[in-house]
Amino acid sequence: MQLSRARSAVRPFLQAGLRPSGIAFARVQSELALSRAAGRRFQSTSESTTSSPASSPNPSASTEPPRTSPPKISRWKRFLQGLGTATLVTVLGVGGGFYYYSKHELNPGPQLDFDPEKKTLVILGSGWGATSILKGLDTEDYNVVVISPRNYFLFTPLLPSVATGTLSPRSILQSTRYITRHKKRKVTVIEAEATDVDPANKIVTFSDNSGVQGQVWSTTLPYDYLVYAVGAETQTFNIPGVREYAGFMKELHDAEKMQDKFMDCIESAAFPGQSSEEQDRLLHIVVVGGGPTGVELSGELHDFLEEDLKHWYPELADKIKITLVEALPSVLPSFSRQLIEYTESTFKEAKIDILTKTMVKEIKEKSVVLAMPDKSIKEVPCGMVVWAAGNTLRKVTKDLIAKLPEQDNRRGLIVDDHLRLKGADGIFALGDCTATQYAPTAQVAAQQGNYLARILQHIAKRDHIQKQLDVLAAEGVVDAPEKKGEIESLAKQLAKWEKLRPFHYSHQGSLAYIGSEKAIADLPFFGSGNLATGGMITYYFWRSAYLSTLFSLRNRTLVATDWMKVKMFGRDVARD
Ligand SMILES: Cc1cc2nc3c(=O)[nH]c(=O)nc-3n(C[C@H](O)[C@H](O)[C@H](O)COP(=O)(O)OP(=O)(O)OC[C@H]3O[C@@H](n4cnc5c(N)ncnc54)[C@H](O)[C@@H]3O)c2cc1C
């Protein structure tokens, strides 16, 4: 009776699809407890009565105790329990792995000391080419010295994002020592600029040209092998005013300077009493160069305007104008036609003006002088010009070319199929400082770096065998019959290691961000095919591709966090 009363008390709640609550629920619970107790009492009574069949008042009654089936767990509950367990295991696994890996990166183990028996390998530069070698190189084979005016690696493809505050500068750089400390043998890192390479005597001269110098700031170093990866500098085509008034987009400080100047233009435009024409001038940004860097920068500037400046400078935002100037007939000449058109239409929607077949003649303090497609000259007022138009050789590279009669290409250093510098012994060159059939891209420099790391290992093995043969020759036992087998085996090995595979570039595709959460990608498809795609999904692909290409867990974490921060809190408009 109690049981049925309790059930009838709960029924209204169940029928209403509600969970009983408050006092009513407490009452129902106590009634249920009573009914359970009653049930137990009933059960024990029946057990005691059935335990003695002789005393059973009803002989036809069953001797089996009543069966109670185990409480049923609904499928949904089982699913939730499974999901919870899987989530917990995943979180613990990923968290533990992340913790272990980050601790490992922070605490590199002991390293082998310098070995006077090993050859000296000097690497000039700490960019894409040099860092890829360092990553892949087995430093046990050499005493390695890295010389570069930057003591870090810069992930250049994300530099335009730093210029608009989407990423913080530190997120896309990686200290070179961080990389070298994880190598087997100690690597010397010198923050200095190579000022001269003497290929005849195998000596490199370098100087500390930083703000602070010690008593010694310039010295020389002999090398056995030299890897020349100093990149290139920005090409200005000797156009008047470029160096004085334009900003560049090559180094980290260029991006930081640009961000600062852009915000300065906006704050000056907001100054009380500024005329409408002056506001228009200050808020006109001209980007020169329609390659991936210029396009990405224009897209990033547009995002900054739409997502942030419109909120913080509502009275000025509509006046901000971005113009992209390109001398060729179209922007992004290395991309397929449909992606060029897609970019042009996206820019049109975003109100970014594209001026193709237009040449910059001069840059002045407050304007840019343009030669238009119809050959007319137009002076356009602007607050800021960013120059992202091409590469030229550094002075040290030009000097090296001048020393070698075999080097007669003004575009860059000539190398053979194994990246050996033509006309010099023991020098390898790669990346933007070379003149090859490949475009000057990070992808090419990185693949060349990986290749050279393998080749240098190969050469170390070859040199080791040669050394053994030289020792036998010095001992005068080359003709001794008991040494014949050993010498033949060494000669065979030497012949094997003499064969170096030539460098082969494998194009992995081209990617560019074009703003408005859209990216474009030209990807190789089944050998000679090509997949051209653009839009929002490509944008997520672009992001994940760059995240996976970043060189360390630290960089990946910082960049992903920056992207999340900007999504949640927007970009910073404060100026230092
Ligand atoms: C803004 C921007 C965006 C880019 N985006 C892409 C992209 O999306 N995809 C792509 O494939 N490529 C991209 N690139 C091109 C790519 O960055 C270069 O092709 C690549 O950096 C070339 O590698 P490198 O090793 O030859 O030169 P760098 O990476 O430039 O490295 C040169 C190194 O040499 C050092 N150095 C300079 N002078 C000396 C000296 N005298 N002595 C010693 N060391 C010296 C420098 O400090 C630097 O560490 C971009 C470039 C820029 C600037």
Image (cartoon, rainbow, N blue to C red):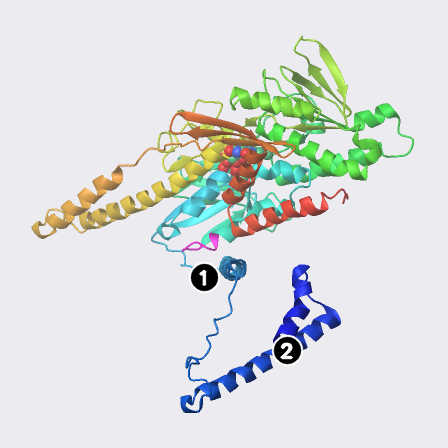
Label at residue 109 = 1
Give the vertical position of 350 relative to 489 (above or below).
Answer: above
Horizontal side, residue 241 vs residue 179: left or right: right
- Residue 183 among magenta residues: yes
Local SS, label 1: loop
Residue type (three-letter) at the residue carrying disc 2: Gln
Magenta segment's dominant SS is loop
- Residue 99 among magenta residues: no
Image location (x, y in percent) of residue 224: 38, 43
Q: Which residues are magenta?
A: 180-186
At 21% across and 44% down in the image, what residue appears? 493
Choose the circle earlier in sequence order: 2 or 1.
2
At 63% across and 75% down in the image, what residue appears? 32
Quadrant into which the N terminus falls: bottom right
Residue type (three-letter) at the residue carrying disc 1: Gly
Horizontal side, residue 259 vs residue 454: left or right: right
Q: Quadrant of residue 574?
A: top right
At 43% across and 59% down in the image, what residue appears? 111
